[in-house]
Image (cartoon, rainbow, N blue to C red):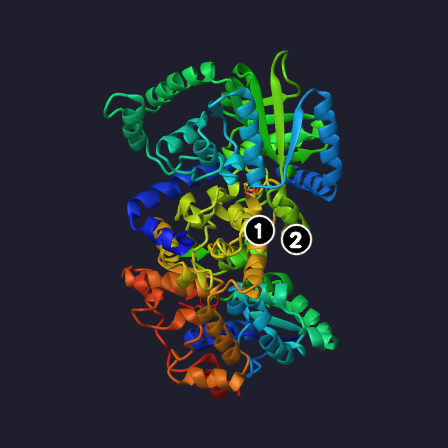
């Protein structure tokens, strides 16, 4: 199984350890993983700002980088959702739409790839801390990684399923289990006041319920929340879920 | 000039505790909605059904409207058609003039808010008394409603006490909701008894019977309509449902989604004028046919104005209804408003994180967050985006579509990804106001990979 590793731009630049943990986890589970060196970004920052029409070059690049793989895996639900919903060949290159379709169908967020494709049932990991899971909206409501609190439906959670395989993890119960953190791409600067307030409120929920380590599948939300935590000098550590799933503490 | 959403929201957030209170009050309503929804095992099926009924309505709106008009006329209702807000207001004024009336009562109608009926009538010498308690409060305070179901949700009871003391003479310092409600009722009673014309909104208009249904919790629509010689009901053309039986779907969804009640206290059917009474019904387009013609936004017309999308919206809860500068606030307002005026409302589709909670609570399954995304594209393409933003986005696109430029910008100290708007670490960057920047690592993942796996 040939897996192409997609490491989004801000993870590449700011959180290389998340990329490393993702790579090591997939390798440990027997995947043949490579990282196409010419990758950059999924194009979402432009598209969500109303500039989807400027993403053609990004899309072309993405297709060139990833169309040869059986699966494309990424430690970011938001970027995966963007590709799934919006990756198409530029209008005058419709002969490449097949490549785009292949990628849209074969791209997976890390946790769903582990539960649904690799069907992981146990992990050799130990992490003796109280862990608070942040459900990122694009992963949850977009990719359905977990059941959404608004729907009258049976609960499930792919990230929780995996965290429960890690020895000694204690999952924290939150007052609002799937409220948005307020990151929202360019929203975080365009609507700074509301964005920050939402981040503060999310963190407050974790503080009140005793989170020691805050985790999630989307580094963008975590970057925003970590920004709030560090500014307020709170004793909460932030780690991507891939880091916990590979932990041996 | 209207203040844009971000600026108004920043002002709202200056009062930290009040923002907490506003958020928690609405979250409590969202939780009530959850409990009500979860008490119905077939809830999701109900939403599906409602959405499909509305789908049918929108696909055959012309036929249903004509059918409704024919049946309503048969019942003795006078039907008027208004192309826009202005025509709607003129029609109402002409009815009042014919009656020689200068004082009227009005129960809740978001449509008349949308058409700015009250100021129009005031300019023409007509005094309107809003009879919904929440609307009465904002009317006394000379403000627009901040929420379509809970118009004065941004007011604390102590503040209402002060307002009532000033306007209705309640004892100073009285903030007891029962006493305040009683005082408002007493004051309204006199209006109900003396006003000869009453305006109401419409929740549902049934094509097969020509009747319309008005839902309230206070019975104020009924008080107004039953005591008046002339009843004028105003509705947007999308309020049609084909059959009376469909109320069994919509009434179950409406109150549960809105306030968590099983049903509104009064769901009143108005089929024909009583002997000696005149009944008018104004059917209003005001941009609805334009929206019907915009395929990606058409479904926004399914809205039954329950307000659930506002109560669940994390941005609405922390910015307040007035920050949306539109009669309908929140997520639904943000996809309806640009249809009415793109220039004035270009900011609204961006007042969202696209979290998607609104689409999940919506009883008629409007894909609200997807439409917010689509409006962003439409607004940008039609030139409603600031030039600086366009330049920034073009620069970002140039960096991100060229791997070597991207790597080089990354090398120049991590922070040189300056075109990704959230990574500029200086005090002018809004990011930095309340958050720290990530600490730049010594190498990127790409560099690490080249060394360790390359
Ligand atoms: S869009 Fe849906 S949730 Fe929002 S007010 Fe309308 S019906 Fe209710």
Is disc 1's CB within 8 Å of ligand 1? no
Tell me if residue A27 comes above or below residue B21 in the rendering: below
Q: Is residue B279 visible?
A: yes
Task: Answer with left or right where residue B223 lies relative to residue B73.
Answer: left
Q: Nearer the viewer, residue A48 or A63?
A: A48
Quadrant location of residue B147? top left
Pointer 2 and pointer 1: residues touching (CB < 8 Å)? yes
Could you tell whether B249 is left or right of B162 in the image? right
Q: Is residue B306 above or below residue A245?
A: above
Q: Element at badge 1? A: helix
Label disc, if present, on residue B148 of the rendered structure? none
User: Ligand 1: which quarter?
Assistant: top right
- Residue A92 location in percent, x, y? 71, 76
Residue B188 position in % (x across, y down): 41, 19
Residue at point 41% right, 62% down? Answer: A190
Q: Identify the subunit bearing mark 2.
A: B
- Mark 1: few/some/many CA within 10 Å (<14, 14-19, 20+): some
């Amino acid at each position: 199984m040939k897996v192409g590793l997609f490491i989004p731009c801000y993870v590449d630049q700011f959180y290389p350890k998340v990329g490393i943990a993702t790579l090591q986890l997939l390798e440990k589970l027997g995947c043949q993983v490579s990282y196409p060196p010419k990758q950059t970004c999924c194009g979402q920052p432009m598209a969500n700002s109303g500039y989807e029409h400027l993403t053609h070059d990004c899309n072309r690049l993405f297709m060139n980088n990833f169309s040869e793989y059986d699966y494309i895996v990424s430690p970011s639900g938001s970027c995966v959702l963007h590709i799934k919903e919006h990756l198409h060949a530029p209008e005058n290159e419709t002969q490449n739409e097949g490549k785009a379709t292949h990628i849209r169908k074969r791209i997976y967020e890390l946790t769903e790839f582990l539960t649904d494709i690799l069907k992981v049932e146990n992990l050799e990991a130990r992490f003796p801390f109280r862990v608070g899971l942040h459900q990122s909206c694009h992963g949850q409501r977009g990719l359905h990684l977990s059941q959404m609190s608004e729907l009258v439906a049976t609960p499930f959670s792919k990230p929780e399923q995996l965290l429960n395989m890690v020895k000694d993890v204690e999952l924290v119960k939150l007052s609002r289990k799937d409220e948005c953190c307020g990151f929202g791409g360019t929203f975080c600067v365009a609507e700074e006041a509301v964005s920050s307030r939402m981040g503060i409120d999310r963190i407050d929920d974790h503080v009140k319920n005793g989170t020691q380590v805050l985790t999630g599948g989307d580094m963008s939300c975590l970057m925003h929340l970590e920004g709030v935590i560090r500014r307020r000098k709170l004793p909460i550590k932030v780690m991507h879920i891939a880091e916990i799933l590979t932990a041996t503490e | 000039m209207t203040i844009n959403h971000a600026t108004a929201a920043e002002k709202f957030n200056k009062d930290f505790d009040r923002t907490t209170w506003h958020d928690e009050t609405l979250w409590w309503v969202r939780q009530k909605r959850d409990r009500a929804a979860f008490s119905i095992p077939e809830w999701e099926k109900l939403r599906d059904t409602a959405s499909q009924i509305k789908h049918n309505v929108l696909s055959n709106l012309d036929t249903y409207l004509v059918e409704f008009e024919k049946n309503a006329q048969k019942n003795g209702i006078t039907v008027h058609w208004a192309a826009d807000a202005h025509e709607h207001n003129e029609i109402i004024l002409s009815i009042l003039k014919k009656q020689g009336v200068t004082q009227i009562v009005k129960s809740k109608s978001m449509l008349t808010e949308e058409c700015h009926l009250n100021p129009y009538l005031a300019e023409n010498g007509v005094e309107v008394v809003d009879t919904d308690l929440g609307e009465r409060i904002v009317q006394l305070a000379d403000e627009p409603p901040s929420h379509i179901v809970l118009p004065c949700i941004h007011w604390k009871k102590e503040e209402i006490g002060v307002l009532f003391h000033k306007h209705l003479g309640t004892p100073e310092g009285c903030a007891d909701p029962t006493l305040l409600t009683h005082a408002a009722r007493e004051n309204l009673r006199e209006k109900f008894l003396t006003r000869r014309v009453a305006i109401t909104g419409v929740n549902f208009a049934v094509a097969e019977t020509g009747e319309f249904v008005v839902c309230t919790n206070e019975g104020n629509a009924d008080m107004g309509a039953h005591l008046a010689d002339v009843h004028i009901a105003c509705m947007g053309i999308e309020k049609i449902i084909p059959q009376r039986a469909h109320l069994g779907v919509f009434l179950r969804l409406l109150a549960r989604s809105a306030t968590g009640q099983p049903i509104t206290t009064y769901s009143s059917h108005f089929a024909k004028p009583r002997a000696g009474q005149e009944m008018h019904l104004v059917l209003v387009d005001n941009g609805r046919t334009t929206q019907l013609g915009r395929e990606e936004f058409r479904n926004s017309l399914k809205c039954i104005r329950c307000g659930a999308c506002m109560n669940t919206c994390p941005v609405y809860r922390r910015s307040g209804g007035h920050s949306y500068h539109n009669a309908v606030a929140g997520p639904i307002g943000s996809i309806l408003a640009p249809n009415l005026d793109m220039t004035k409302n270009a900011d609204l589709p961006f007042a969202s994180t696209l979290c998607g909670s609104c689409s999940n609570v919506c009883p008629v399954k409007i894909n609200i967050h997807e439409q917010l995304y689509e409006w962003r594209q439409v607004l940008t393409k039609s030139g409603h985006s600031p030039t600086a933003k366009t330049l920034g986005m073009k620069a970002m696109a140039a960096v991100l579509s060229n791997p070597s430029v991207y790597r080089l910008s990354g090398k120049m100290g991590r922070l040189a990804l300056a075109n990704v708007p959230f990574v500029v670490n200086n005090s002018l960057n809004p990011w930095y106001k309340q958050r720290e920047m990530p600490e730049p690592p010594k190498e990127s993942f790409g560099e690490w990979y080249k060394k360790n796996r390359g």
